Image (cartoon, rainbow, N blue to C red):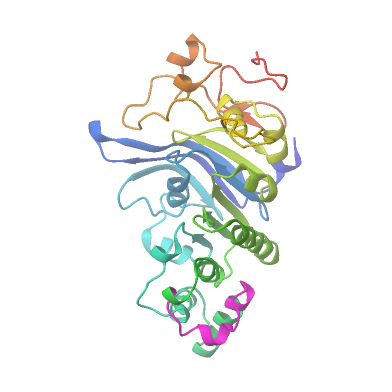
Amino acid sequence: MTLKSIKTPLLEVSGLSTTFGSGRASIPAVRDVSFRLNKGEVLGLVGESGSGKSVTLRSILGLSRHYGTTTGTVTWRGENLVTTPEAKMRRIRGGEIAMIFQEPMTSLNPLLTVGLQIDETLKAHTDLSASERRKRAVEMLDVVGIPAASSRLTEYPHQFSGGMRQRVMIAIALAARPKLLLADEPTTALDVTIQAQILDLILSLARDFDMGVILVTHDLGVVAQTCDQVAVMYAGRIVEEGPVRPVLRDPQHPYTVGLMRSVPQDVAPRTPLYSIPGTPPSLLALPAGCAFAARCPQKSDQCETGRPDLTGAGPERAVACFNRIRKEGGAAA
């Protein structure tokens, strides 16, 4: 038994599935997703656009229940969030579990000052007085690196740069001192320098507040530098998961291998960059077998008809593939 297996996880997701629509128009956006996150760990969710990463985060918080059907279990402090009443979920969201959304300009209310938006979170999830809430708001803006924090409480989102708006989003998310942070591509549309600053900030605050973090990203470089665990998603399922270093050094699922090959490394000038051939399947018409089979160089007849389960592939690792890749490049038995 490994050390991780005997820990009580901060969050445990088991068989999580979310479907939109019904009948022939039913879209299985997330299918049978399972993972564990320990206190203080950072889990990276990676995969192409449309693979189900963002919907997974929203399903954990119960944000998908109003326009979709979510099943499975999301165990948080002994309670299944999938079946938790909405009134209680409102107390959990922002208080115990917070989320940073992709685009701050569409997530922040353009008609309310930044200070008022932080105050809303504090009023809903803390017992602080008005003066204490203002003090906490100033403290949070200062913590996330916004200069002259006190004077900027009265400013509106459009008066901040893109990077500063993202910092405001982080300040709002962390104002009530949550124990779990869900970060949905928090550096989208930011330049490389600001991206690095935002990621460093999230990790620093996670350590300071002793939070667990689930980070959605397309960037494997970000995963390598910031995450403890990684889960690779494709067509709504996790196809490979485990500790970051073993997975990135020795990827065993052909899709993970393709993602790794897509990262430019020592490429000669004017050399075409590698990309995984083909496109992801439509969620309205998923194949009977492995969803990656049509794009997979390792596929066999079994892949066309059978759907591989996510099974153990080494210490704390799991892969959903009939023809796993050996490190030297051959197919695993």
Visible in this render: residue 316?
Answer: no
Question: Where residue 186 sits: x, y (%)?
Answer: 53, 57
Question: Where residue 43 sits: x, y (%)?
Answer: 61, 47
Q: Is residue 80 above or below residue 15?
A: below
Visible in this render: residue 255?
Answer: yes
Of residues 229 and 73, which is closer to you in this image?
229
Q: Is residue 265 above or below residue 278?
A: below
**Residue 113's image quarter?**
bottom left
Magenta region includes residue 153: yes
Total numbered labels placed on residues in the image: 0
Magenta part of the protein: which range? 141-157
Q: Report the residue at 25% width, 37% height from top.
A: 22
Q: Is residue 70 left or right of residue 309?
A: left
Residue most toward the front?
270
Question: Where residue 25 sits: x, y (%)?
Answer: 25, 35
Residue most toward the top?
301
Question: Where residue 194 sits: x, y (%)?
Answer: 60, 62
Magenta region includes residue 134: no
Residue most toward the bottom?
131
Q: Quadrant of the N terminus?
A: top right
**Residue 297's image quarter?**
top right
Q: Is residue 78 above or below residue 237?
A: below
Q: Is residue 170 above or below residue 259?
A: below
Of residues 270 and 77, which is closer to you in this image?
270
Q: Quadrant of the C terminus?
A: top right
